Image (spheres, rainbow, N blue to C red):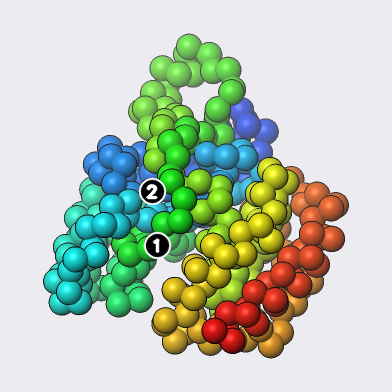
């Protein structure tokens, strides 16, 4: 039976992409994604950068983590704080148990131990949980928002792989069958591009540091016909909700005072995850986005 490194080399050859460590992460991320789908159905909505790449625009860059939101938000609305926290922790435990099972099959280091912050970290009053899976010292982060205001209907789309559209020989399919059993396209419930756009803007303003990948994802969404200024009201709702937590409020306040994307868009570490160089018009877009972010942050702080 071939090992993972051999399958990574095979995917690199078929895709023409010579970034083995990132290809390996993509394979593992797809395995985790499929495991979540198999165990929870459509209970968790796929979102974020991995969703944009796999479900919408194809591989213009790699994504190194997974993001989900619990779909049935109505479930929480009638619960008091104590009962809500108990339910959230219980759901986090079930999710962690599935991740532990997947990790055992893929030689990832993860334990279903909700008290061990090396593996599980709660945030925002247990409303958000970050699961940390390790492979040779490298982190694969799986983040779940259990409580989130969803503004748009979700979609059902196909999650693609680096082998999507590639012709495989019969003997290749037989040899790599164990990997191809999971590294194959499948349907998944996911965020709409509108919802992703609003959350991307919120992420840019509430994180401690800007990332090229987030700015470029917004650029790709705008290229698809969705201009950020047309979603001002929805974006503001997302930001105001996040600002209930002190650390996010401080990040938005910093953004209102000063935003500078020039150094971000030339970050060599971030550029490494791109399969092709950023398009030339991206740089003028980044300047326009910088002005929009400053304006939105200033408006949010005044509320």
The percent coordinates of residue 27 (x first, y second) are: 46, 41
Mark 1 and mark 2 lie on one chain; the one further toward the N terminus is: 2
Q: Is residue 21 left or right of residue 174?
A: right
Q: Which mark is residue 45?
A: 2
Give above or below for 251 relative to 230: below
- Residue 27 showing in the rendered view: yes
Q: Position of residue 254 (x, y in %)?
A: 62, 86
Q: Are marks 1 and 2 in contact (CB under 8 Å)?
A: no
Give left or right: position of 23 versus 191. Answer: right
Read off the residue under disc 1. 149
Residue appearing at x 79%, y 55% in the figure: 282
Q: Secondary structure beneath disc 2?
A: strand
Vertical position of residue 297 compared to residue 191: above or below: below
49 horizontally vs 112: left or right: right
- Image point (44%, 73%), residue name: 241
Residue under the point 73% across and 65% down: 289
Please state which of the two labelled residues, at mark 1 or mark 2, is closer to the viewer: 1
Total of numbered circles in the picture? 2
Q: Nearer the viewer, residue 121 or 139?
A: 121
């Amino acid at each position: 039976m071939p090992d993972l490194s051999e399958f990574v080399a095979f995917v690199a050859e078929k895709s023409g992409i010579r970034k083995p460590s990132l290809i390996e992460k993509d394979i593992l991320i797809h395995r985790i994604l499929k495991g979540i789908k198999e165990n929870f159905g459509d209970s968790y909505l796929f979102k974020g950068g991995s969703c944009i790449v796999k479900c919408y625009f194809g591989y213009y860059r790699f994504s190194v983590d997974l993001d989900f939101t619990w779909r049935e938000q109505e479930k929480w609305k009638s619960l008091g704080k104590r009962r809500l926290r108990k339910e959230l922790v219980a759901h986090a435990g079930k999710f962690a148990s599935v991740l532990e099972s997947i990790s055992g099959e893929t030689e990832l280091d993860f334990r279903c131990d909700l008290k061990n912050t090396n593996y599980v970290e709660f945030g925002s009053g247990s409303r958000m949980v970050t699961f940390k899976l390790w492979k040779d010292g490298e982190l694969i982060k799986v983040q779940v928002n259990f409580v989130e205001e969803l503004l748009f209907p979700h979609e059902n789309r196909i999650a693609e792989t680096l082998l999507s559209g590639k012709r495989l020989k019969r003997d290749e399919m037989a040899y790599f069958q164990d990997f191809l059993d999971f590294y194959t396209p499948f349907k998944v419930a996911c965020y709409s591009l509108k919802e992703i756009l609003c959350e991307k803007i919120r992420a840019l303003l509430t994180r401690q540091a800007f990332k090229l990948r987030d700015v470029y994802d917004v650029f790709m969404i705008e290229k698809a016909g969705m201009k950020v200024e047309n979603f001002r009201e929805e974006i503001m709702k997302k930001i105001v909700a996040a600002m209930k937590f002190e650390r996010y409020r401080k990040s938005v306040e910093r953004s209102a005072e000063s935003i500078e994307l020039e150094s971000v868009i030339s970050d060599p570490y971030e550029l490494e995850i791109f399969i092709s160089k950023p398009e030339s018009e991206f740089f003028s877009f980044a300047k326009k986005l910088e002005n929009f972010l400053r304006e939105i942050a200033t408006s949010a702080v005044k509320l």
